[in-house]
Image (tube, grey):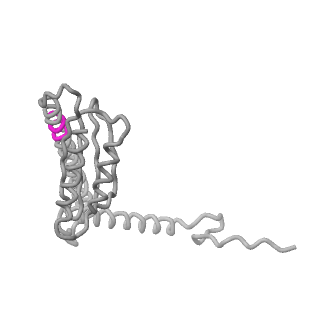
């Protein structure tokens, strides 16, 4: 019968009671705190809070800089959230005006197409005047983008009130006119679907 392996050696030198020595525990705590302070300094400097602090800066000074940076960043995030809410409300209001101002009482769907160029990619947003019954318009729009040479990275739709919002994120090749071809094909497909 084989003997079990011996237990692993202790991580800290132990005194007679089996506990690590106080000075070892304190040294490990200080090392951990120094590593955390260094990481905090690195993150604050990487965030653009201030140029690298002078070597003579005390730890409380560096903690004060970090606290000020966190406060400024929190305020900036709140301002950006407020701005996003304003833009979303403005977009919803303009979309509502576009849909109700067309005077189409026959039930034909009003479609708004917005395309944003993002370097080698596109961000397309389609807003229809009526919610989808079977999702065919969404699938045809995605197919049109792919047929024109775009590589769909992400596509989804949501229903907001009486409107359907389709969002398509696409990568487009580097060839001359690729982006314009994808945009044109998308718009032609959407116009063709509205007249059906």
Front residue of this view, candidates 122 and 24: 122
Give coordinates of residue 110: x percent, y percent: 20, 36
Give coordinates of residue 1: x percent, y percent: 88, 73
Residue 15 among those drawn in magenta:
no
Q: Quadrant of residue 91?
A: top left
Front residue of this view, candidates 118 and 177: 177
Q: Spot the residue most to the right.
A: 1
Give coordinates of residue 96: x percent, y percent: 17, 32
Q: Residue at x 29, y 51 (%)?
A: 168
Q: In which quarter of the image is the C terminus?
A: top left
Front residue of this view, candidates 76 and 140: 140
Q: Residue at x 41, y 66 (%)?
A: 30
| 13 in relation to 169, above or below | below
| 187 in relation to 54, above or below | above
Q: Which residue is drawn at 22% across and 67% down?
A: 57
| 122 in relation to 77, above or below | below
Q: What span is in magenta?
A: 86-93
Q: In which quarter of the image is residue 117?
A: bottom left
Main secondary structure found in the magenta portion? helix
Front residue of this view, candidates 13 and 157: 157
| 13 in relation to 166, above or below | below
Q: How many labels does the image show?
A: 0
Q: Spot the residue most to the front.
A: 196
Q: Quadrant of residue 32?
A: bottom left
Give coordinates of residue 34: x percent, y percent: 37, 67
């Amino acid at each position: 019968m084989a003997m079990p392996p011996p237990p692993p050696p202790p991580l800290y030198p132990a005194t007679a009671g089996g506990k690590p020595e106080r000075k070892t525990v304190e040294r490990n705590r200080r090392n951990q705190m120094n590593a955390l302070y260094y990481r905090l300094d690195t993150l604050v400097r990487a965030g653009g809070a201030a140029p690298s602090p002078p070597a003579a800066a005390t730890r409380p000074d560096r903690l004060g800089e970090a606290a000020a940076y966190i406060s400024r960043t929190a305020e900036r995030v709140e301002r950006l959230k407020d701005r996003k809410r304003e833009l979303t409300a403005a977009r919803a209001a303009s979309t509502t005006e576009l849909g109700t101002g067309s005077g189409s009482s026959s039930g034909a769907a009003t479609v708004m197409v917005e395309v944003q160029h993002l370097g080698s990619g596109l961000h397309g947003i389609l807003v229809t005047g009526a919610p989808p019954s079977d999702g065919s318009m969404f699938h045809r729009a995605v197919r049109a983008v792919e047929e024109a040479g775009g590589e769909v990275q992400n596509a989804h739709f949501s229903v907001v009130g009486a409107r359907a919002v389709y969002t398509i994120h696409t990568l487009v090749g580097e060839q001359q006119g690729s982006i314009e071809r994808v945009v044109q094909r998308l718009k032609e497909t959407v116009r063709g679907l509205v007249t059906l």
